[in-house]
Image (cartoon, rainbow, N blue to C red):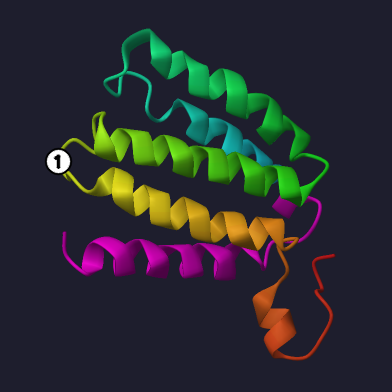
């Protein structure tokens, strides 16, 4: 593995958070709940056969609860990170042309999960010393 296998996804997570933190409520929460739900299907046919269906069955209800709570969106992304570990170690990578893509997804997902678990604040508003204008 190379340094960029870790740094690239971390940079991507920072960019994601900076962009998403500028989306006004309630759209910010709704969009991210839908993204968390949609991400449950990315590994279907990822090497575990019928067991691939287990992840969406577990994560979709959590993502649905994210329509009311950012913490549930964060939990959904942490669940996705766990599935990323399984695919990195034993399954197929998320992108067949990039063997470390599941590892990168793990980093990206875990970092954005921490933002959601913190309530998804607008970091640009916080940097300006102002309250989050999207809330």
> Residue 120 lies in what quarter of the image?
bottom right
Q: Residue at x 14, y 40 (%)?
A: 97
**Residue 35 visible in the snapshot:** no
User: Which span is picked out in magenta?
Assistant: 1-29
Q: Is residue 42 above or below residue 13?
A: above
x, y percentage for residue 94? 29, 37
87 or 68, which lies in front?
Answer: 87
Q: Residue at x 67, y 68 (%)?
A: 22
The C terminus appears in which quarter of the rendering? bottom right
Q: Is residue 119 above or below residue 27?
A: below
Q: Which residue is mark 1?
A: 97
Q: Is residue 68 shown in magenta?
A: no
2 or 122, which lies in front?
Answer: 2
Q: Determine whether, in the image, residue 66 is placed left or right of residue 98.
A: right
x, y percentage for residue 103? 31, 49
The N terminus appears in which quarter of the rendering? bottom left
Looking at the rendered structure, the number of numbered marks drawn on it comes to 1
Q: Residue at x 64, y 44 (%)?
A: 75
> Residue 3 lies in what quarter of the image?
bottom left
Q: Is residue 14 shown in magenta?
A: yes
Q: Is residue 64 above or below residue 77?
A: above
Q: Residue at x 41, y 18 (%)?
A: 52
x, y percentage for residue 91? 26, 28
x, y percentage for residue 114? 61, 60
Q: Secondary structure at mark 1?
A: loop
């Amino acid at each position: 593995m190379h340094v960029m296998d870790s740094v690239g996804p971390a940079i991507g997570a920072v960019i994601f958070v900076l962009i998403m933190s500028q989306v006004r409520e309630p759209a910010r929460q709704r969009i991210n709940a839908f993204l968390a739900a949609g991400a449950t299907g990315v590994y279907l046919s990822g090497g575990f056969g019928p067991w691939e269906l287990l992840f969406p069955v577990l994560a979709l209800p959590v993502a649905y609860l994210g329509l009311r709570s950012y913490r549930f969106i964060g939990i959904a992304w942490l669940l996705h990170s766990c599935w990323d570990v399984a695919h990195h170690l034993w399954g197929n990578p998320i992108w067949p042309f990039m063997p470390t893509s599941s590892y990168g997804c793990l980093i990206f997902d875990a970092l954005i999960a921490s933002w959601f678990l913190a309530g998804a604040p607008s970091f640009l508003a916080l940097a300006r010393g102002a309250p989050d204008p999207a809330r």
